Amino acid sequence: MSRLMSVGDGPYAPPVPARELTAVSADGARLHVEVHGPEGAPVVVLAHGWTCSTAFWAAQIRDLAVDHRVVAYDQRGHGRSPASPACSVDALADDLEAVLEATLAPGEKAVIAGHSMGGMTVMAAATRKNLRERAAAVLLCSTGSSRLVAESTVVPIRPGRLRTWLTQRVLGSRAPLGPVTPLARRILRYGTMGPGSAPHMVEACARIVHACPRRVRYAWSQVLDLLDLDHGVRSLDVPTAVVVGTADRLTPPVQARALVAALPHCVGLTELPGVGHMTPVEAPDLVTGKIRDLVMTYATLKEGA
């Protein structure tokens, strides 16, 4: 579905993968996985966020695949991965483990980048042996570990019970998103992107988000509403960089700063002025550059160095 609804040309058109495969999670859920770039190159694994798909990482894949092996997968129910009745943080962790197992050679490590729910996926897997052995470094983009609804600023009123209640109703809506119209683009830009986002960026994100099935969107919204992964942050003891936009309404900078304070091995916080929640689309070069830096610093070291 993600390819049918994604843009057809430009920097956000999904590149054609070198190969595709299916990873099978612990509960039997099947995950669509794409592999881009040359075999034998340093590996980057990309985990997208709520309502998105592998198409969300198009700009990063196109750039990195020149000299990296890039693995991108659709979270269960998203993109080309079939929906599953099991929606939980444990399922997210199981799925990431399955993708790592299916794509990495024995002893091989990768830099793992997660955006929004993709970052939460990494935190959920932080205590897992597989992640500890496979992650050379991590990039957390526009994400948080708890209090997501209470700290969201999508509803522009003072913090408190009323704002939290209204935010739950907005983010947990069962209503269909419908076609991508001018009004739909304005709503999506307000809620998820910076005010200066270029029209082609908004269009790319709108097509991807509107492709997510309504039932999947709702099911995962309930998981995010109750999310508490603070223990996962404290267990994520690999080098971890954090990126957030100052105009992010879904996971505002207060979330990123809390991550930085709790991470055992934080290697930097980058706050992007005027950028919203969709950092890999809104600031593609910067996000790609952060991934490259992590690969260069932590994933190309010789064994035992």
Image: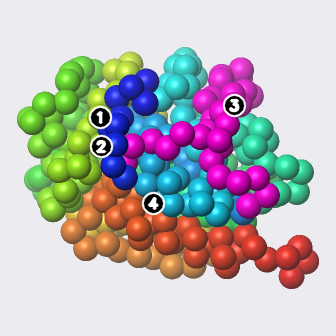
Q: Mark 4 or mark 3: which is in front?
A: 3
Amino acid type for the residue under numbered disc 4: Cys
The CA distance from mark 4 to mark 3 is 26 Å
| The image quarter in which residue 81 lies | top right
Amino acid type for the residue under numbered disc 2: Ala
Which residue position holds label 1? Answer: 207
Which residue position holds label 4? Answer: 141
Instruction: Please report the residue visible at 69 percent of the width from the left and 28 percent of the height from the top.
Output: 22
Q: Nearest the camera: 74 or 69?
A: 69
Instruction: Please report the residue visible at 16 percent of the width from the left and 40 percent of the height from the top.
Output: 185
Which disc, if any, is residue 204?
2
Q: Of helix, strand and loop, which one carries label 3?
A: strand
Q: Mark 4 or mark 1: which is in front?
A: 1
Q: Is residue 105 left or right of residue 267?
A: right
Which residue position holds label 3? Answer: 21
Q: Quadrant of the N terminus?
A: top left
Amino acid type for the residue under numbered disc 3: Leu
User: Whole-percent x and y of residue 29?
Assistant: 65, 22
The CA distance from mark 4 to mark 1 is 21 Å
| The image quarter in which residue 113 lies | bottom right
Do residues under tags 4 and 2 come within 8 Å of each other at their CB atoms?
Answer: no
The CA distance from mark 2 to mark 1 is 5 Å
First-in-chain label (4 vs 3): 3
Instruction: Please report the residue visible at 12 percent of the width from the left and 52 percent of the height from the top.
Output: 156
- Label 1 Cα crowd, 10 Å radius (few <14 / some 14-19 / many 20+): many
- Label 4 Cα crowd, 10 Å radius (few <14 / some 14-19 / many 20+): many
- Label 3 Cα crowd, 10 Å radius (few <14 / some 14-19 / many 20+): some
Amino acid type for the residue under numbered disc 1: Arg
Q: Of helix, strand and loop, which one carries label 1?
A: helix
| The image quarter in which residue 282 lies | bottom left
Residue range in magenta is: 12-41
